Each structure stands twice: as C-alpha cells, then as structure tokens.
C-alpha cells in the first residue's frame, strides 16, 4: 500500500521490560520513533534506504520501540506541520531525512525540548537536534574509477537534485576519479530541482546520451536514468541509495548503498538509556554506512581490481580523493599538492574541479 504524507504506518508491540530492581519489575513505555521522508519508500533509492533502516531498527529492538513514518513530505511548511504532529503524537525521537527539512527541524525542536531530533545531511544543531550524514562521495570515487576505465567517449554526466555541497562533492569525486584514469574525462552536471521525478530524470538522461555521454551518474532517488541507459545501450551508470540492478541489470555497473540501520539502533538505544546527546556523525565506507553494490559481470577484472583498490584505500585511510593538487574548472589551484581537504571544507564545497562542465 502506498501512503500519502497524511497516512502514518505504525509498527510496534508490547512494552519492553526493564531488569528487576529490588524484586520488582518496572515496565518501560516503548520508545516511539518517527521518520519523515521527502519521497516515497518505493523510490528504490534514497528514501527506500532510510525506510530499510527503520525496519532494521524495528527488527533489532522489537517491542522496545514503535516506529512511525510519513512519506512524500515536501521541503517547506508542510514539513514543519508533519514534524509537529509527530512530536504531539508522543514520538520522543524523530529522524528528518532530507537536507531541506533543516529550518523546520530547528523551529519545531525549540517547541518540544523533551523530544530528540536528528537531521540527515544537515548542518544546524541545537541541544536536542543532532546531525548524521554519510560520505557518499567515497562511493563516487569508486564509481568514477570504473567510469574512467570504461567510458568510450570520455564523457560522463551527473543528474543532480540541487547544487548543495553534498551533490557538488559527488560530482567532483566522480570527476577526479575518472580523470585519474583518463585525463580527458569530463563530467556534465544537470540539476533537475527535485529529488525524485522519473519523467525529468529520464528526459535528462536521453538528452545527455544524445550529446555523447555514455556514463550516467545520479544524485536523485529513482532508477529512471539507469533504465534509459539500458534502453539506449550506453556503457551504463550507478545505482543511488540502493541496489537498482533489478530495474537495469545491464546498465547498473555498481551502486552506492546507504545502510542507515545501525545508526538508528544506536540513537534509539541512547534515548532509551538516557545517554543521547546531539551528535554529529559523518560515516562512510569504513563504518559500512556507505556500501558498494555488486560489480556488473561485464566489468573487466582489472577494472574491478582498481575499483576495489580505491574502495579499500578509503577504508584504511591510504587514499583520500580530495587530496591536492586540485584545480577548479577555471584552472585555479584550490588545493595544494599533498594537502587533503578538511571536513569543514568539504561540507561547504561550492566549486567544481577541473573537467566538470558548466551546470545546466
């Protein structure tokens, strides 16, 4: 059943029991945990990934928690209303999973100081507002390595949602990795001003392929671009947020898979134990919050080996994609040789590296 943002699914069981204290059993009220998604849980991508994390939480903690989700929540006034309703319904931990929810989270959190909020991919904190994020760009470095090896035209495209640092980082990581293999490799960014619109994603993919692009990456939530890649018979592209190979088995070269479940479990346990603090986590391949999907069987073994070298290098710290020398797409040096960009610099990235075309 597909739910609208006004339809709330609640899953839970009996309250969990606390250990015996002085011979008396005290029943602890189950923790109610709310989630809001900018798209549908059936997008087979980013929102699907977060909902899989919710299910992971429910399965892991069982009767100790009761989870609720609301999908298709626009980034704007409606988000504020939904957050307030979740707090009023007794949810003591609320996860807002899209960047554009930030202003609403801060406003509503001030009204409910006894409720813990966590904002995914955000940057504004408060005493009861924590942040959590994933280093998606690490996965892009793996994808870019594959793209640099396999592209026949040397032209890739990146279908993005909005020009926020998270997306800009992904574009740049793809370009830097591709150019490590092929110095003439280029990436063309296209922004569609939405996280999930299959028609727009598909139209963008067709237009880009007509321009000679044979690799398509995406920072949108569904498999439409990959399906077009398969229809048009180009080299391929990459799943975003989840394994999309079921929709484009020939075109998906690998996928960036988001594994949010352990973070949700840890946060819920902390609230139950009374130890929750407004943290700020940014985890990636090392912590397995970012995972890579299976490599397509058509990828040559030497290319897989190079991709694996980049993946494992980011896990053990021997490789960092944003290490200088790095020039921007105007030719100016932005990062000196041997210098690695800091997290603060990455989280404010608003420029494109050499080889990235003018966004449209």
Image: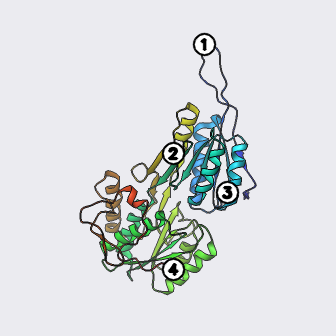
Q: Which mark is residue 163?
A: none
Label 3, label 1: how far apart the Cα atoms are: 45 Å
Decide if residue 108 is in sight here: yes
Mark 3 vs mark 1: which is more N-terminal? 1
Q: Residue 195, located in which quarter of the rendered image? A: bottom right
Q: Quadrant of residue 42?
A: bottom right
Work out how far the residue at label 1 is from the one at label 2, CA to CA, in angstroms.
Answer: 33 Å
- Disc 3 on helix, strand or loop? helix
- Circles 4 and 1: CB atoms closer than 8 Å: no
Closer to us: 344 or 44: 344
Q: Confirm or deny contact between disc 2 and disc 4 (CB under 8 A).
A: no
Relative placement, left or right, of 298 versus 2 is left
User: Dot 2 corresponds to which residue?
Assistant: 263
Mark 2 to mark 3: distance in Å?
23 Å
Q: What secondary structure is marked by label 4?
A: loop
The Cα–Cα distance between marks 3 and 4, rounded to whole angstroms, is 28 Å
- What is the crowding at mark 2: few (fewer than 14 residues within 10 Å), some, or many (at least 20)? some
Residue occupied by mark 3: 79
Horizontal and vertical percent position of residue 11: 69, 43
Q: Quadrant of residue 302?
A: bottom left
- Please tell me which of labels 4 and 1 falls first in the chain: 1
């Amino acid at each position: 059943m597909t739910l609208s943002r006004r339809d709330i699914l609640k899953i839970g069981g009996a309250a969990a029991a606390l250990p015996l204290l002085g011979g008396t059993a005290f029943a602890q009220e189950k923790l109610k945990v709310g989630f809001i998604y900018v798209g549908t849980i059936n997008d087979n991508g980013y929102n699907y990934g977060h909902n899989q994390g919710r299910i992971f939480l429910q399965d892991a903690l069982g009767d100790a928690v009761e989870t609720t989700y609301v999908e298709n929540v626009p980034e704007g006034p409606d988000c504020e209303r939904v957050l307030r309703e979740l707090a009023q319904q007794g949810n003591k931990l609320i996860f807002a999973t899209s960047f554009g929810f930030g202003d609403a989270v801060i406003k509503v959190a001030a009204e409910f100081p006894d409720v813990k909020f966590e904002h995914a991919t955000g940057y504004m904190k408060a005493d009861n507002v924590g942040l959590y994020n994933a280093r998606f760009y690490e996965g892009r470095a793996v994808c870019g390595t594959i793209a640099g090896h396999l592209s026949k035209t040397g032209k890739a495209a990146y279908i993005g949602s909005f020009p926020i640092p998270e997306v800009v980082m992904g574009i740049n990581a793809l370009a830097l990795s591709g150019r490590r293999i092929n110095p003439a490799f280029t990436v063309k960014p296209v922004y569609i001003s939405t996280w999930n619109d299959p028609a727009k994603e598909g139209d963008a993919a067709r237009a880009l392929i007509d321009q000679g692009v044979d690799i398509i990456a995406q920072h949108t939530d569904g498999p439409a671009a990959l399906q077009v890649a398969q229809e048009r018979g180009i080299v391929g592209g990459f799943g975003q947020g989840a394994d999309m190979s079921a929709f484009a088995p020939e075109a998906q070269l690998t996928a960036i898979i988001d594994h949010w479940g352990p973070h949700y479990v840890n946060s819920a346990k902390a609230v139950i134990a009374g130890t929750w603090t407004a943290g700020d986590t940014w985890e990636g391949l090392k912590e397995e919050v970012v995972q890579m999907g299976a490599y397509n069987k058509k990828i040559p073994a030497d290319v897989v080996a190079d991709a694996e070298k980049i993946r494992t290098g980011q896990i053990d710290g021997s490789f960092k994609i944003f290490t200088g020398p790095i020039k921007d797409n105007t030719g100016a040096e932005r990062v000196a040789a041997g210098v690695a960009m800091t997290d603060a610099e990455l989280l404010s990235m608003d420029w494109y590296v050499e080889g990235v075309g003018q966004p449209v």
